[in-house]
Image (cartoon, grey):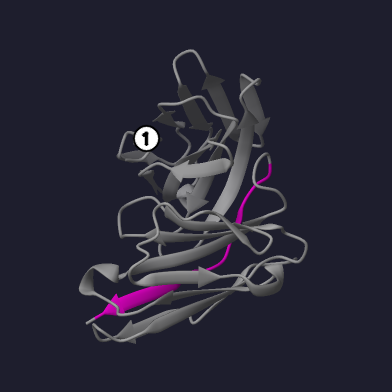
Amino acid sequence: SQQGEEDPQALSIQEGENATMNCSYKTSINNLQWYRQNSGRGLVHLILIRSNEREKHSGRLRVTLDTSKKSSSLLITASRAADTASYFCATVFNTGGFKTIFGAGTRLFVKA
Amino acid sequence: EAEVAQSPRYKITEKSQAVAFWCDPISGHATLYWYRQILGQGPELLVQFQDESVVDDSQLPKDRFSAERLKGVDSTLKIQPAELGDSAMYLCASSYRPTGWEQFFGPGTRLTVL
């Protein structure tokens, strides 16, 4: 079973609005990463947050991590039509070696 | 800018045939991953290499799938025989180290098994 579970599964917003996606996981992690995937293409790394960090920013992206709740959120501010894509969280944890598990993703549609 | 290369981009095959996918990671990246992504789902890790060694292949269907990374550089993923349920996107990714570093993904190979 997948460690990371995103919600919502799909999100439709107007251009200029903020989009928030959430990720929950089950076991202790080393770090958590967010990726974007445009339809039919490879994934692109957005941001990495380590287990001892609580918040990170990158441009219009803000990621928070709550290790006590085993959850993370990705906020995209002032969304644009070009932000339309699927967003995945990936948890990296140590099982004697470092393993990465992706969630099922949130499909974001930004209407112009 | 360095990229992960994959070939072919698309592959159509009949069930019971053999297929092979190739991946060339970014130079200097010790860790290489093969993922399978079914439409509408997240990538599922099939195999992870550290240099030329397999460090995780727990989700690889070993009766039909095999992967190698000779000399710790490029890698090949093979399916023999292919089954209808293998239709998916096969993604290769690489990273400088197995943790703490982002993964760079190739464009993927879209496999259709008829």
Looking at the rendered image, the quarter that the N terminus of chain B falls into is bottom right
Q: Is residue B52 magenta?
A: no
Q: Give coordinates of residue A23: x percent, y percent.
A: 42, 30
Q: Which residues are magenta?
A: B101-113
| Left or right relative to A31: residue B82 | left
Q: Note whether residue B96 is visible.
A: yes
Work out whether residue B64 or residue A101 is closer to the camera in this orientation and state it: B64
Where disc 1 sits, the SS reads: strand
Q: Note whether residue A41 is visible.
A: no
Work out whether residue A28 or residue A54 is closer to the camera in this orientation and state it: A28
| Left or right relative to B95: residue A80 | left
| Left or right relative to A87: residue B113 | left
Identify the residue at image location x=43%, y=67%. B90
> Mark 1 — residue?
A6
Work out whether residue B64 or residue B111 is closer to the camera in this orientation and state it: B64
- Compared with B9, B59 (above or below) is above
Q: Give coordinates of residue B47: x percent, y percent.
A: 49, 58
Q: Give coordinates of residue A11: x percent, y percent.
A: 33, 39
Extreme-right residue of the structure: B28
Where on the picture, by quarter, is residue B109?
Answer: bottom left
Identify the residue at image location x=25%, y=86%. B14
Number of numbered tags placed on the structure image: 1
Extreme-top residue of the structure: A68
- Compared with B103, B28 (above or below) is below
Identify the residue at image location x=56%, y=66%. B106
Identify the residue at image location x=52%, y=46%. A35
Amino acid identity at mark 1: Glu
Where on the picture, by quarter, is residue A33?
Answer: top right
